[in-house]
Structure formats: structure tokens, C-alpha cells
Amino acid sequence: MPISVITIARQVGTGGEEIAARVAEALQYRLLDYRIVQEAAIEAGVSPETIAEAERRPSFFARILEALARNPAAGAVQWGEPVNIGATPILTSADYRQLVQQVVEDFANHGRVVFLGHGAQFMLRDRPGVFRVLVTGSEPARVGRIVQQMHCDEDHARELARRTDAERIAYFRDYFGAEWLAPASYDLAINTDRLEPAAAARVILSALQLLQPAAA
């Protein structure tokens, strides 16, 4: 069947966010990144900021769910701009993960969507019509990008890259029994050390064109 869902996992500092946006724009697919969290927050009746805080303190999110269970009519908290939590620790609350999975599966059922992060590649691994991409890179190249994007020093950038890698590796092993950075977990792995985001996006689009005749 045709590819209607694309998941893009990326290491911090690889340009994965821009790559996902370019692929979604070229295909006219919907891009879901931090909005997955926002949708989960709406369903839970809390703000994205509260969800982001829960990612740092899982017990806090559990208390929110308990409060909602006691008072299901409670209104949603008001919030401002959505929070992009791509570089924050991953929440391990089973309740939160279930909310995110429900959102991912709902959008996947409708198709024509690009998921950026949040484990969609493993949540949808048995679903036909899904193309899973990993955007990776060497530490020096990633550190260089982080320094440019965050205007920080190399030590801070290196610590961020190593910490987020370690968190995600542990998370996906524990909760999906999967190796986050293993090429076999994906249909395509792209190293962006020498590829700018626009070129990497074209690689993904070319791969999709090759797959579509076989899938049609």
C-alpha cells in the first residue's frame, strides 16, 4: 500500500526538525512534533506546560491524572504558546505514554502525516504504509550545530547531546524493547554530517518515490 505515514527520529543537533518540516511541506502532509504533546494535553484537560513539567517529574503527572479521575468535569488550564520539549527528558509515566500513543494512532489512521519523535516509529512499527527514518550524525558535527543554534559553548552542547542520547536509548529499551539508534529499527538512516537539511529531505523523498511503485 502507499506510504501515508512517515516517522522521523533524530538525534539532537542533526537538523531533524527542519528535515521533517521540509518533507511534510513537499508531500503536503501534516507535521506533528510537539503538537502530539499538545493534543495529549488537551485530551487530559491540562496545559502543554503542565505536561512539560510532568516530563521532568513523572509523579507530578500521576497526581494530575488522579485529580482528573476525582473531578472529571474539571476544566482545562489556560495556556499561551505551545512548548517544544524535544530536548527535555522523556516522561516515563505509563498514563502519559498511553495518551501520546492514542494521539499517534488516531492521526496515523487518517494518514498523510509526518511524525517527528515521541516514539512514533515504534508505536507504529507493525502498521503497513509507514516509512521510518532515523536522522543521525557524529558528535562533533552535532555539537557544532547545537553551538550555532543555542549560542552556547561546546561543553554545554556536548553535555546536551550525550544526555539526550542516553535518555532516549534507555527509554526505548525499557518501554519498547527497541534500540533507538539501531539502523535495523528504521527503513532509512541518514547521516547529516555532510548533508544540509534540504539535501537530507530530498534523500527521503527519493526513497519514497522508489517505494511507492512496489507499494501500489
Image: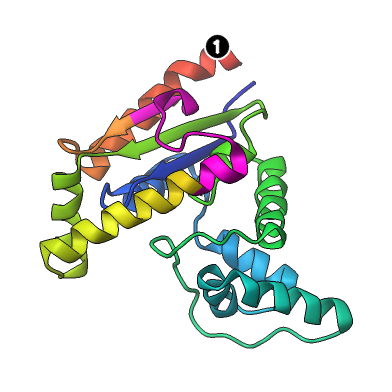
> Whole-percent x and y of residue 144?
13, 54
Closest to the observer, 100 or 82: 100
Magenta residue span: 171-189
> Whole-percent x and y of residue 17?
36, 52
Q: Name the residue: 65% across, 71% down.
A: 41
Examine the structure image and report whether residue 182 is included in the region drawn in magenta: yes
Quarter of the figure with the C terminus: top right
Q: Is residue 203 above or below residue 16?
A: above
Closest to the observer, 54 or 14: 54
Q: Name the residue: 55% across, 38% down.
A: 121
> Whole-percent x and y of residue 18?
32, 51
Instruction: Answer with left or right where residue 124 lies relative to residue 140.
Output: right
Quarter of the figure with the N terminus: top right
Q: Name the residue: 37% across, 31% down.
A: 204
Residue 71: quarter of image: bottom right
Q: Name the residue: 40% across, 23% down.
A: 207
Tag 1: amino acid:
Ala
The residue identified by callout 1 is: 214
Instruction: Determine if residue 116 is in view.
Output: no
Q: Is residue 48 above or below residue 189?
A: below
Q: Is residue 213 above or below residue 42?
A: above
